[in-house]
Image (spheres, rainbow, N blue to C red):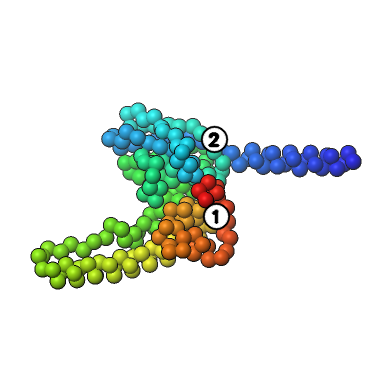
Amino acid sequence: MKKSLFTLALALLLIAVSATAKKVKLTIDGTLSPTQRTLYLIVNEDTANAQRIAITDAKFSVNLKVDANDIIRLHDWKEWPERSVFVLLPDSRHITINWRTGTIEGSPKSLRMQQAIREAREDDPSGFHIDVFSDDKEAWEQARIQGESIRAQMLAQQKQTIMRLIKDNNNNIGAWLAYCYAPIFEGGLPQMTNGTTPKWLSHPIFKAHK
């Protein structure tokens, strides 16, 4: 009986230690654009509890405690997560960003996240258009048809890139990309998972937004 109680106590202790180990105390600081007046810190896209960060002379610093698997977004808007440049992963105790240069220091995983985000955006067709310097209606129509064709090709390429990145990053990077880009897939997340249950699908970012 005593042995069973000891085993149970040890198991509970290991669970408690494991849970504690997942927490990370983190300092994030950096330099912003001189004109920037607003900065939000959002964890796992919980925008209802977004923290507005104080800015002094284009500088900021914030201390927080997060889970090691959390995704932290720094942005001047609560909306449009897919437009964010600084999406951070807490793999260290101190991360420094620079809004002017777009750099991240002290976090290799955040750099990998940033690289994946840039790759995912490369073929984004939303900003593509063809300029027509003519009053000819036929020229405008041809440009419209050509533009639609090119945008469709860009979208198809973007989807392929995103799926490759998610496959290569079956973790919180994959979770972030899937969260941001599911709307561009006709079938949403089910199409992206294709009947499988990837590791990233269990990320809290999805549980909070079902």
Compared with residue 66, is residue 204 higher up or lower down, i.e. above or below?
below
Q: Nearer the viewer, residue 75 or 149?
A: 149
Q: Are marks 1 and 2 in contact (CB under 8 Å)?
A: no
- Badge 1 element: helix
Residue 89: percent from left, percent from top: 49, 45
Give residue 210's mark. none
Callout 2: 10 Å neighbours few (<14), some, many (20+)? few
Instruction: Tell how many labels.
Output: 2
> Which residue is drawn at the image coordinates 80% and 42% (left, top)?
8
> Which residue is drawn at the image coordinates 61% and 42% (left, top)?
22
> Which residue is drawn at the image coordinates 68% and 39% (left, top)?
17
Quadrant assignment, res 127: bottom left
| Residue type of the residue flagged with mark 2 | Lys
Residue 143: percent from left, percent from top: 20, 68
- Badge 2 element: strand
Relative to 109, is 4 on the left or the right? right
Kindly report the distance in space between the C-alpha atoms of the residues bearing marks 1 and 2.
22 Å
> Which residue is drawn at the image coordinates 56% and 65% (left, top)?
195
Quadrant housing the N terminus: top right
Look at mark 2 in the image and give the residue it sits on: 65
Name the outermost residue toward the left: 135
Quadrant assignment, res 182: bottom left
Name the outermost residue toward the top: 56
Observer-side mark, 1 or 2, equals 1
Look at mark 1 in the image and give the residue it sits on: 200
Residue 10: percent from left, percent from top: 78, 40
Callout 1: 10 Å neighbours few (<14), some, many (20+)? many
**Is tag 1's residue or tag 2's residue first in the polypeptide sequence?**
2
Residue 156: percent from left, percent from top: 38, 67
| Residue type of the residue flagged with mark 1 | Trp
